[in-house]
Amino acid sequence: MSKVAILTGAGKGMGGASARELVSRGWKVALLSPSGNAETLARELGGIGITGSVTEEADLARLVEATMSAYGRIDGAVLSTGHPPKGDLLALTDADWMKGLDLIILNVVKVARIVTPIMERQGGGSIVNISTFAAFEPDPAFPISCTLRAGLASFTKLYADRYAAQNIRMNNILPGFIDSLPEKDVFKARIPMGRYGKVEEIAKTAAFLLSEDAGYITGQNIRVDGGITRSV
């Protein structure tokens, strides 16, 4: 029986690459993105594609309902989103911060509410959140992202502790600068490997964390950053 994953932010970039990687490993996939690209990629991959937003619980419910209707199970989730507003620390508005909260933390909470009962009935599952290297080394270029993704790490640990006994795992991937974005020399110069990461490298990490090979890994933040973070 093929395993089944839902993926958000999956029209392109790290989410899209994760969908391709999972299909290459025999998974069935259901994809969500706001642009329509998820529907296009799903047709290519033989999966389900839905146009919608991770900030809308109704859209997430449609994704899960379509997946359960087609495949009858959900074994994994890869949750990726767009980027929250950027700007100088105190110039960012309350609305900017609330948008970031919706994109970074509440989307994970909403998906977890919907899929956890399904995974409990199945006897297990795995959720992978695409976070950022800056979650634990705050970067002034991304004030909302790094602040709230530190909060996502706390939620992930709480969730992992709560559902470990049900064989449901949750982990975060902390990418560095990845080639889904245009390269900037100022960022590239900070990377010990001297290059941006590839979306395929993030995708392989996500697939590993969903797999049984990672069956004893939960509540963790896995850096995939070319060495850019300095903390031990």
Image: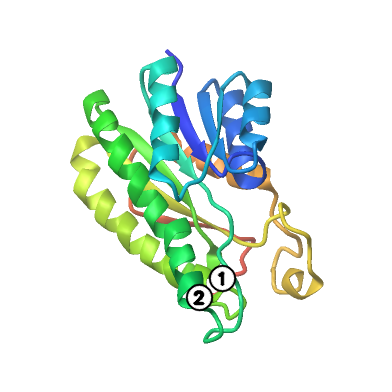
Mark 1 and mark 2: Cα distance apart in space = 7 Å
Residue annotated with mark 2: 137
How far across and how far down the image is residue 59, in percent? 45, 38
- Does residue 92 show up? yes
Q: Is 15 drawn above or below residue 190 in the view shown? A: above
Type of the residue with mark 1: Thr
Q: Earlier in the sequence, mark 1 or mark 2?
A: 2
The residue lying toward the viewer, choosing from 23 and 226, is: 23
Quadrant of residue 230 within the rendered picture: bottom right
Element under disc 1: loop
Q: Is 1 drawn above or below residue 109 in the view shown? A: above
Residue appearing at x 28%, y 37% in the figure: 116
Q: Residues within 10 Å of mark 2 (few under 14, many from 20)?
A: some
Residue annotated with mark 1: 229
Report the side of 82 relative to 153 (left or right). Answer: right
Is the Cβ of the residue at disc 1 closer than 8 Å to that at disc 2? yes
